[in-house]
Amino acid sequence: MTYRSLAELEDAQDQERRTARLRIESADQYLGLYRSRMFQVRESFYTLGAREGVADDPGFRQELQRVSDTADENVAYAGRKIAELDDEYYAMLREHDEQRDRFLAERDDTG
């Protein structure tokens, strides 16, 4: 896209940065909520098992461990994806700097 002014370019870049940061912050928040909810589910599951007298049953403990492992894997996967978003954000910032430099260089060449 061709920008008519440096301010127009910077406004577009600011909007792109805000949108990207919002995506990352939202992902972080959702991951925190998921982590918290899964902790509550595990605690409830264990409490129910204890109340029913099966908390020490190997099958119950195995299933509780499976649920815990799955939740942990999901959190780790989501954390990696958020890290990728962060990496993309910083790459975008570098690209913005390059775009700005190119814009200024082109303006100097024509002016």
Image (cartoon, grey):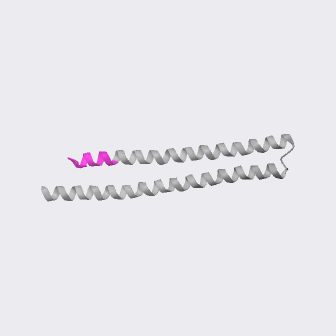
- Residue 20 picture location, percent across and down: 42, 48
> Image point 45% across, 44% down: which residue?
22
> Image point 75% across, 41% down: which residue?
44
- Residue 101 picture location, percent across and down: 26, 58
> Image point 64% across, 44% down: which residue?
36
- Left or right of residue 2, residue 21 in this image: right
* Number of numbered discs: 0
- Residue 90 picture location, percent across and down: 41, 57
* Chain part drawn in magenta: 1-13
Q: Quadrant of residue 98?
A: bottom left
- Left or right of residue 90, residue 57 in this image: right
Image: 40 above or below 83: above
Q: Main secondary structure of the magenta part?
A: helix
Which residue occupies the extreme left position in the image? Answer: 111
Q: On the rendered image, what quadrant is the C terminus found in?
A: bottom left
Which residue occupies the extreme front position in the image? Answer: 59
Which residue occupies the extreme right position in the image? Answer: 53
- Residue 69 picture location, percent across and down: 69, 54
In magenta stretch: residue 11:
yes
Front one among 67 and 105? 67
In magenta stretch: residue 110:
no
> Image point 56% across, 44% down: which residue?
30
Q: Quadrant of residue 102?
A: bottom left
